[in-house]
Amino acid sequence: MSEQLLNLAHGISATILEGFDRHFSIYQQITSGAQKRFEDCDWRAAQRAARERIVLYDHRVDKTMALIREVYGIRDIDTELWKQIKLCYVRRLSYHRQPELAETFYNSVFCRQFALQYYTNEYIFLRNAISTDYIEPSDGEEMPFRPITSNRLMMKKAVTAVTTRKLRGCEHRCTNLLKTRVLIFRLKTLIVILALLCAGLFVYSEVRPTERPV
């Protein structure tokens, strides 16, 4: 294998892993505000954060693909090159804290560029290459989630906010339904009154004595 091909494989594998690290860093920044959003019952902000997390992944994959094409001029698949890229990537994951997620990111970058026939374990990670059993959790991962306010108070605020919103919506719908039923009842009453009037006029006209001619 030529030195040029090996250097190219090292460069592309480094670019993909840097793209994943950038994605994971931004993802953690978005997620770090989850506790405060929950405590403040800020559900709109929670929805925005969820949308940002979903859009972020596709955006970072596209950015990494564009960078590979721009810097290395990769357009068509070179099977030998991508086999070597995967090997270089596996070596870089040996001391990585999130190897399984990084493998998934690599698969996304590859699969969005090349055809289905190359979706084999030679080019992508159909099976995990790095075991995570040896990775010890960090202090942040061991730390339990402890909100500043008590759990009971926090849950009470959350339930109250949701219940109040639902009750308001239910009250509005019930009010509209009640108004509709009252209107229907009035219309039915009016129809009955008109029917009775018509019947009374008909009976009166039948029983009225006929005037005799003079």
Image (cartoon, rainbow, N blue to C red):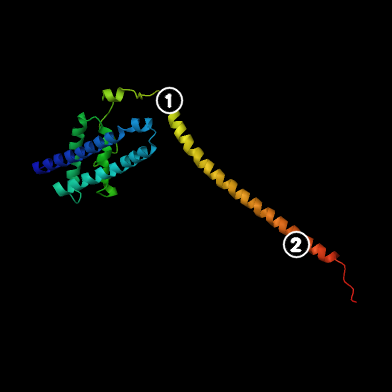
Total label count?
Answer: 2
Q: How far across and how far down the image is residue 200, in percent? A: 79, 60
CA gap, disc 2 to disc 1? 66 Å
Numbered label attached to residue 198: 2
Q: Is residue 203 left or right of residue 150?
A: right
The structure residue drawn at horizontal position 65% and vertical position 51%, both measured from the top left corner, is 185
Mark nearest the camera among 2 and 1 is 2
Give the residue at mark 1: 153
When asked about the image quadrant of residue 108, the answer is: top left
Tell me which amino acid carries mark 2.
Answer: Cys
State the quadrant of the N terminus.
top left
Q: How far across and how far down the image is residue 60, in percent? A: 25, 43
Numbered label attached to residue 36: none
Q: How far across and how far down the image is residue 89, in percent? A: 20, 37
User: Can residue 86 be seen by looking at this rendering?
Assistant: no
Q: Earlier in the sequence, mark 2 or mark 1?
A: 1
Front position in the image: 104 or 117? 104
The structure residue drawn at horizontal position 29% and vertical position 48%, both measured from the top left corner, is 116
Front position in the image: 123 or 25? 25
Which element carries disc 1, helix, strand or loop?
helix
The structure residue drawn at horizontal position 19% and vertical position 38%, both measured from the top left corner, is 18
